[in-house]
């Protein structure tokens, strides 16, 4: 019986209805709001990590750009928790879907670009034509810079999708090879199992790094336009 490698990326359904909305809302349960005078260790660690990441991302922004801090920290928490939950057995990772990643990247990119054209019109238009460009190259450079501007959200979404999907596929292949080698050669199966454990640890790091990279690039786009 041939197993479909991409079966784990199919949107799960319950009684014929897609439940991806419930899966997307699930990570919110992991971040409870503090309501006590003295927080416990979990909430204290959560707040410390949030402040650390937020301070590192907001250090380059002016006061106008720092108004986006709540949106950026919510974004990194959502992507990071979704990626980590997707590593659990029999789970579904919404960030492996290009449509969802585009749904996050395009509005954020468009908001940053519109903000730049609204508040820094001259500086935003100056990006399309570097200073000192020869006159014959002006039309070509404007076209190239315009294309590169519109490619930015696609690059954001494709980078996240490709990294998460590639890691899950590799874990699936090595896990299948380990099960097949158990009945053939036990020492070889143990070696592949160790590789699988190391790859799983690497995927935990990749899940957090990709969330940080996605949010950092959005923050850089915002920095260029505020």
Image (cartoon, rainbow, N blue to C red):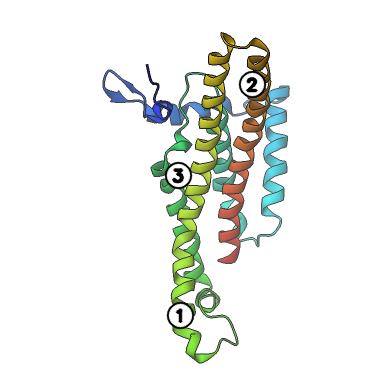
Near-viewer residue (64 or 163)? 163
The answer to whether residue 220 is above or below residue 74 is below
Helix, strand, or loop for circle 1? Answer: helix
Residue 130 quadrant: bottom right
**Residue 192 image label:** 2
The Cα–Cα distance between marks 2 and 3, rounded to whole angstroms, is: 32 Å
Quarter holding residue 59? bottom right
Q: Nearer the viewer, residue 107 or 192?
A: 192
Element assignment for label 3: helix
Q: Residues within 10 Å of mark 2 (few under 14, many from 20)?
A: many
Q: Which residue is mark 3?
A: 101
The nearer-to-camera label among 1 and 2 is 2
Mark with earlier residue (1, 2): 1
Q: Which residue is mark 1?
A: 140
Residue shown at 66%/25% (left/top)? 195
Q: Position of residue 128 (x, y in %)?
A: 50, 76
Seen at 54% across and 14% down, the residue is: 179
Per the rendering, the mark at residue 226 is none
Residue at the image position 43 percent from the left and 26 percent from the top = 8
């Amino acid at each position: 019986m041939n197993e479909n490698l991409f079966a784990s990326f199919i949107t799960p359904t319950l009684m014929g209805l897609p439940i991806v909305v419930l899966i997307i809302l699930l990570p919110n349960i992991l971040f409870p709001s503090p309501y006590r005078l003295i927080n416990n260790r979990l909430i204290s660690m959560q707040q410390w990590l949030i402040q650390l990441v937020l301070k590192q991302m907001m250090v380059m922004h002016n006061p106008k750009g720092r108004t986006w801090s709540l949106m950026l920290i919510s974004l990194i928490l959502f992507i990071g928790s979704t990626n980590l939950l997707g590593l659990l057995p029999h789970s579904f990772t919404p960030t492996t879907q290009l449509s969802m990643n585009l749904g996050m990247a395009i509005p954020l990119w468009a908001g940053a670009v519109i903000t730049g054209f609204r508040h820094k019109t001259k500086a935003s238009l100056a990006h399309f034509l570097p200073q000192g460009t020869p006159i014959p190259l002006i039309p070509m450079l404007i076209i190239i810079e315009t294309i590169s501007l519109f490619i930015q959200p696609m690059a954001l979404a494709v980078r996240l999708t490709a990294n998460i999907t590639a890691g899950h596929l590799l874990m699936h292949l090595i896990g299948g090879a380990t099960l097949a080698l158990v009945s053939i050669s036990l020492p070889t199966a143990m070696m592949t199992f160790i590789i699988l454990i190391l790859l799983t640890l690497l995927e935990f790091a990749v899940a957090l790094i990709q969330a940080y990279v996605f949010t950092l690039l959005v923050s850089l786009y915002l920095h260029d336009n505020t």
